[in-house]
Image: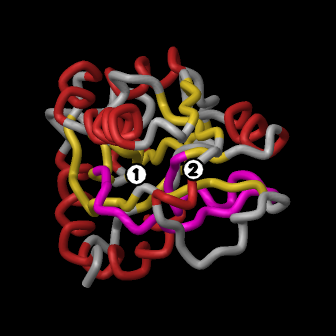
């Protein structure tokens, strides 16, 4: 019966990376060969994000993303940490810095930089604090929510935006360039605080194969 199948429902949106799970899928199947997966698309809005993360296990079992402890607490979910993801710089291909191999913070002097609003994550708040106190020649513009419109603004205004390498396929006219600093954000798989047996089996399999 359909209800007896081990199906992992993976939430997928333009801003929610799932490709890395699909790349690992053959190795995951070695640990749980009966497991199947289903991609569940959703529109990436603040309201949808809160609804989905607060009800993981209902219509969607897992979603990948970036977080801190407060994020998990307020969203009412848990996370399997996979990486400390470096914070990169999204740059329009027409920008003078677009095809650099890496950037120093000094390269951003005089630039307009888009940064997610304060309170989204303590790690990006730390970046904001450094820019405001030590690099006042960098103009910081708030981003209320990461979505395609933010990417469009970055490209059309020929400015910069802090983000993640996993977003490099979201917008064809933006490049993600590493920054020579130590700022990272935990990246992982969001799941219910009380995952079902087959979701728990999946998470254990991912833990075994990810990064191996």
187 or 41: which is nearer to us? 187
User: Which residue is at the front of the view, 202 or 150?
Assistant: 150
- Residue located at (63% from left, 45% from top): 110
Quadrant assignment, res 87: bottom left
Q: Secondary structure at mark 2?
A: loop
Q: What percent of the width, then of the height, locates residue 79?
A: 23, 44
Q: Is residue 194 above or below residue 206?
A: above
What element does badge 1 sit on? Answer: strand
Quarter occupied by the C terminus: bottom left
**Taking the image as drawn, is residue 18 in sight?**
no
Residue at 54% across, 73% down = 102
Can residue 123 be seen in the rendering of this structure?
A: yes
Q: Is residue 202 magenta?
A: no
Q: Residue at x 61, y 62 (%)?
A: 176
Horizontal placement of 75 versus 131: left or right? Answer: left
Residue 157 percent coordinates (x, y): 80, 38
Position of residue 44 relative to residue 5, above or below, is above
Residue 59 marker: none
Numbered badge on residue 109: 2
Picture coordinates of residue 58, whole percent (x, y): 37, 27
Q: Is residue 39 left or right of residue 28?
A: right
For the residue carrying disc 1, how many other residues have a C-alpha within 10 Å: few (<14), some (14-19), or many (20+)?
some
Foreground residue, 136 or 74? 136
Relative to residue 164, is residue 92 drawn left or right?
Answer: right
Q: How busy is the neighbourhood of tag 2: few (under 14 within 10 Å), some, or many (20 plus)?
A: some
Residue highlighted by disc 1 = 7
| Residue stretch rendered in magenta on the structure | 162-185
Q: Nearer the viewer, mark 1 or mark 2?
A: 2
């Amino acid at each position: 019966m359909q209800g007896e199948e081990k199906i992992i429902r993976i939430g997928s949106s333009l801003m929610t990376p799932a490709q890395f799970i699909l790349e690992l899928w053959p190795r995951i199947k070695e640990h749980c060969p009966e497991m199947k997966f289903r991609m569940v698309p959703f529109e990436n809005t603040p309201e949808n994000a809160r609804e989905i993360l607060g009800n993981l296990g209902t219509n969607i079992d897992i979603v990948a993303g970036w977080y801190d402890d407060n994020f998990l607490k307020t969203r009412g979910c848990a996370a399997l940490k996979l990486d400390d993801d470096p914070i990169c710089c999204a740059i329009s291909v027409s920008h003078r810095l677009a095809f650099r191999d890496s950037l120093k913070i000094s390269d951003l002097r005089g630039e307009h930089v888009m940064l997610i609003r304060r309170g989204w994550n303590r790690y990006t708040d730390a970046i904001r604090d450094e820019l405001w106190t030590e690099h006042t020649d960098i103009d910081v513009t708030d981003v209320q929510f990461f979505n395609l419109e933010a990417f469009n603004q970055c490209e059309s205004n020929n400015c910069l935006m802090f983000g993640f390498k996993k977003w490099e396929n979201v917008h064809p006219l933006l490049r993600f360039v590493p920054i020579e600093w130590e700022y990272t954000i935990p990246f992982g798989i969001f799941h219910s605080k009380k995952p079902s047996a087959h979701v728990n089996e999946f998470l254990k399999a991912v833990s075994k194969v990810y990064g191996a």
